[in-house]
Image: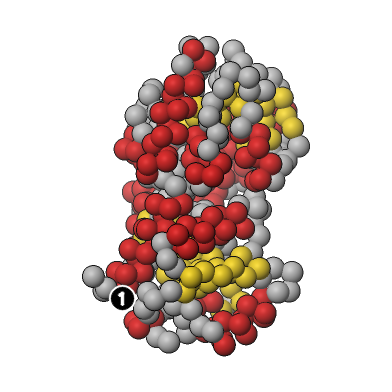
Amino acid sequence: MAASSISLKTKIYFLVGNNPHQTAPHFSRQLSDALQRQGIETRLYWIDEGHFFHAFYDILEDPPDCTCSFSQILVGQKRLGDLWRIPHLSFLIDSAIYFTPHFEGNYSWISCVDQDNCAFVRSRNFNSVFFLPHAAEKEILTLPHDHRTYEVAFFGSCVDIDACERRWRGYPMAKKERLYALAERVLSPQGISLYQAIQEIGVHQEEFLHYYQEIELYIRGKDRIELIRSIQDQEVHIWGPGPWKRYCPQAIVHSSISFEETLLKMRETKIVLNSSPSFKKGAHERLFYALLSGCCVLTGESAFVNHHFVPGKEILTYRFGEYSHDLKGAFSSWKEIALAGQQKVLTEHTWDHRAKDVIDFLISKKNIK
């Protein structure tokens, strides 16, 4: 079945593998259920642990309109759509720069959680891409209440930024200065994206991935550390690996937990911190899941956040590069902010909304009215 002949009759099959934060299986189940509520037939195939060929032969015998996955999947360096000659939609949940093998072919489609990532994909002459932000399911809806165990929490790993800087010191002076300048631009109140910053200085295409990897890792670590350090008036609980105690000795650090356990901890937390400086025109999933779990969210200011939420009323924001937070005042109104943000997610950012976006994209590929 050629990509141009796809119909939207009934069937979309999910190929489900694991990923480092164990979100791919969860997202697959939720979007699959949401598509079913829109009248689409879905199936989920677990393809890790040697199970791929069960899905392979099933799909050969009963081909769907398209397959999809939340994790990067290549089989022998071959794209999945090419195996069956059926379109495969890759829902990218990390920066698109790491998935360039998918940017070609008649059977490859891509969604990105950040609009600048979509621009990057199109800059590589691949146009079968659309913007699909993260979301959360309304089934986890939990109202905020005063008797939550944790005042402030962060869920995520700690990047060893000292190690990054040691590596940079080994580079030629001009390159080292360029890396620091780019990181400073992205972690600035102006809010320029990493993609924009690298584009503006004219890095050669063959060097783009290297610069992106180096700076993304560094800004992710730097922003998280500075954000948590800035909160001195409340206990901050952290769940995640890495040298947190070295950088944030005042924090209470716990062992890593699964995504499902994270959702339970969110229901016990008043304010959740969200740091995702790589997504200036998109947002991390913890923002949506924390709000539906009844948390007030403190997140980095961005074009996406400012467009979709009212800062100070539905969400709390900080400006990148400006870390100074006295959360005492926020605790007098955290429940009201959490409730307002929760309502915004329910009306605009559930998996049911994303399922409609997926269907609209598939219809556009067929030109169905």
Query: Which of 274 and 354 lies nearest the eye of the viewer?
Result: 354
What residue is pinned by disc 1? Answer: 366
Q: Residue at x 54, y 55 (%)?
A: 30
Residue 162 in view in this figure: no
Closer to us: 33 or 172: 33
Determine the residue positioned at 44% across, 47% down: 350
- The secondary structure type at the circle numbered 1 is helix
Q: Which part of the image, by quadrant, shows the C terminus?
A: bottom left
Please, which residue is most extreme toward the left here? 369
- What residue is rendered at 47% in x and 74% in y? 11
Compared to 141, does 198 lie above or below? below
* 319 left or right of 158 in image: left
Residue 369 vs residue 275, the one in the foreground: 369
Amino acid type, callout 1 = Lys
Q: How is the image coloured?
A: secondary structure
Residue 16 seen by the camera: yes
Image coordinates of residue 183 in percent, x first then y, are 47, 39
At which x and y percent is residue 147? 63, 19
Where does residue 171 sit, x and y in percent of width and height? 57, 48
Residue 227 sits above or below residue 111 on the image? above
Give left or right: position of 203 versus 24.
left
| Vertical order, 249 against 5 (above or below) | above
Residue 346 position within the rendered picture, expressed as x and y whole percent measured from the top left: 42, 41
Number of disc labels: 1
- The residue closer to the viewer here, 141 or 366, is 141
Crowding near the residue tagged with mark 1, few <14, some 14–19, many ≥20 C-alpha atoms within 10 Å: some
Left or right relative to 78: residue 9? left
* Quarter in which the N terminus is drawn: bottom left
Q: Quadrant of residue 187?
A: top left
Residue at the image point whose x is 37% and y is 27% from the top: 311
